[in-house]
Amino acid sequence: MTNHPDYETLKDISLKSLRNEARVLNELKIVDQEMSALRNENARLKRELRKYKTFLPIKAALKVRKMLKK
Amino acid sequence: MTEIKIRKRLQEIEQLERYIQTGIRPEEKHEFSCRPLDHGITVIVPIHRGEAYMEQLIETLEAQTLDADQFETIIIFNGDYEKSEALFHSAEKKKKYIVQYSEKGVCRARNTGINEASFLYTAFLDVDDTLSPDYLEHSLEACEENTILLNQFHEVKGGKSDDGSNHINKERADADEYPDNYYQVVKNLSMNGAKVIPTKLLLQTRFEESLNNGEDVVLYMALVSEFKPIVRINRNEAVYHRHLIDGSLSRSKPTYQFNVTDRVNVLSRLQNILKTEDDEEIRTLIIDRMRAQAGFINRYLKKNMEDYDKVQRDIENLSDEYFPYDRINEDLPKRLYVSYCFPPYADTSGIVLAKRIAGDKVPCDVVHNNMYDVRSLDLSLTRLAEPYIHQKFEVNATSSFSNRNHIEIFIKAALKKLNAGKYKEIYSRAMWPASHMLAFEIYRRNSSVRWIAEFSDPLFRDIKNDKRETAFYSKKELKKIRKLIPEQFHGYMDDNLFNMAELLPFILADELVFTNHHQMTSMLERFDDDLQALAKEKATISRHPTLSRAYYNYERHHVELDENKINLGYFGNFYETRGAEDIKTIAMLIRKEGIDAVIHVFTTNVRQVQSELYSGVLKDVINVHPYLKYFEFLNVTQDFDYLLLNDAHTRMYKPRNPYLPSKYADYIGSGSRIWLHYEAGSVLHEISLEGHENIIANPLNDEAAIRDHLHKLTKK
């Protein structure tokens, strides 16, 4: 006769497995949220970069560097 | 974000867990099979009262140019309808009408209509509104499967039409025929009028019958989230006329019921939809609608600030991944919190201030630095204070404890962002001296502001009692500051950042907050009696705040504890003055005395601690885990038999121990027993004498006392 696990054991196994899945999904959700926050941060940095690039002395320096490279 | 439906699956898991534990079976979703529907439009008209508009209503329906066999009108009488029913029956009609009855309530009535619809498409009409004669004909020409059709929307005031020059119609007119995203037509997707919807979608969604109003926005967000329908702008002439009358909801005076209670109900439904939605575009759409609802609450509060606590109580359980607290608090704050480090950056001092905000319960703004370079990000931490915050001004300066340039950049940028004159109160907290330095600059610009300054630890002297020194103020600047300081205290002024970060608040702030009296004494003892008296007069001793139990269950921990053993928890990093030796001593004694207990150490530096603590024989007694995020930490504290808390070793450096570990407040809230290891005369020592039932205590490294306690340890 095979030794079947009792109901309580099965319950524990299912709960544990569901909790593990929830944990992984929660981590994924956090990654999702953080990605969203980082996308915003990235957009902000890009805006800043654009602002600096149009700042006259920097613009001039960039031009000089480009010329020197040539 | 992804192919995996993260949020939906999390909700399923929650239901399955409940089923396993309680036997309550989750609602099974049956495959929807739609009854056969004919090509045409069903017009649904709920009628409660409305007798004044019956003639106009029948007129507009009778005038429709669409073939009579391609549309039907379902009239649903509900509530008070006797007069309008009589008028309806006595009117001469040629088109097809179906009369239904329902309990009072526009949602119930509309759902009754949806159940009876026999055509593929459905349009809603309010009893006091009218349609252009070609409305149904031109709509049916443009109707497509799985597509919500948006028609023209005109407002009629005092019999005069605006010919579509309203914001809803303009939004529609500006959009492409098939808008790229829902956000382009978000206002149109928040109301019932002027659109035709596939009946099949409505049969699977329905109106929320428990809502008094705002049911339309909930329905459309649910439709969008569930079916992602296509939206089409009808370029044919088909006009829905909304007749505005005095006393309509949008014009009436704000009331608690309409502006708060009803909005909270709508917000909670929208939040439920958001909980299972992963698509960022649709999340943005729902969030936008939630913010619009929150605007009503904000408008109410602007006129009835005395109800702020009541509103907060009504919304406190709605805190979740997103809730529009900032919109609710818009323009309400009179207080600004200044904290160089603040959530979402994981930092003890920032967390303590967030807990203070949660305890103070007043609407506020916060200014802080972007600490991404030195602290990890924990978005869940924002939950602590966000119910009370309107704006968080984040300054993007390089993070630094003492660098003059970086702190100056922070202060300049913060002042640029803030409207410093608008606040009546500022509350600064340091640990990071930049907090008080910025608060002082705000005070300089607005001396009528009430300044509360809290000290997390002494600033001028470090843990070994050495002076901290960084040149911060120029001579010119010091000369200007001197004018604000009574002459008798000029002798204490210098350019040192750490001196001034204590001195300026001591002299100028209206209230000083210390976490314990030893801290206050240690920080003040370097001054003369007058300055000490001045500071003590406005000083408050306030231990770190303890959160309510609900926060301890916000996130579930995943730490495995052996239920057959006595589990001791230690949370924190080890330094020279708070070394691993104390834990090692306890572990050695557990081993030596054969006690069935395990110490679980949670630290950011697992490898280093493992190498310090694992001396082979202690492997079974000590278990080192990585540090937990704050809410997971709170959750696990409830499951330990004892929580270990050690004083820092300061005796060789300081006459008294000025440090109260902030973890004490978190441990107290957990309900678990606490085992204190104190330095004689410290605040922890004093706490141990207060007679708390849940606390056992002994002097640091007192082996005899530890051994004695070990033999008395019991399971929780």
Image (tube, rainbow, N blue to C red):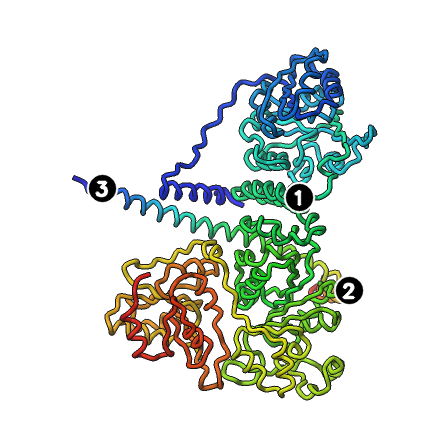
Q: Earlier in the sequence, mark 3 or mark 2?
A: 3
Residue name at image x 44 percent, y 41 percent: B12
For the residues carrying marks 1 and 2, which lies nearer the camera in this image? 1
Q: Quadrant of residue B99?
A: top right
* Residue B576 appears in the rendering: no
Vertically, is B500 above or below B409? below
* Position of residue B252 measured from the top left corner of the image (x, y, whole percent): 73, 39
Cα distance between the residues tagged 1 and 3: 59 Å
Q: Are marks 3 and 2 on the same chain?
A: yes
Cα distance between the residues tagged 3 and 2: 78 Å
* Position of residue B169 measured from the top left corner of the image (x, y, whole percent): 75, 34
**Residue beneath disc 1:** B259
Which chain is mark 1 on?
A: B
**Residue beneath disc 3:** A4
* Position of residue B116 measured from the top left corner of the image (x, y, whole percent): 57, 20
Which chain is mark 2 on?
A: A
Amino acid carrying mark 3 in the image: His
The one nearer the camera, B683 or B605, is B683
Quadrant the N terminus of chain B occupies = top right
**Residue beneath disc 2:** A56
Which chain is mark 3 on?
A: A
The one nearer the camera, B597 or B314, is B314
Residue name at image x 41 percent, y 77 percent: B678
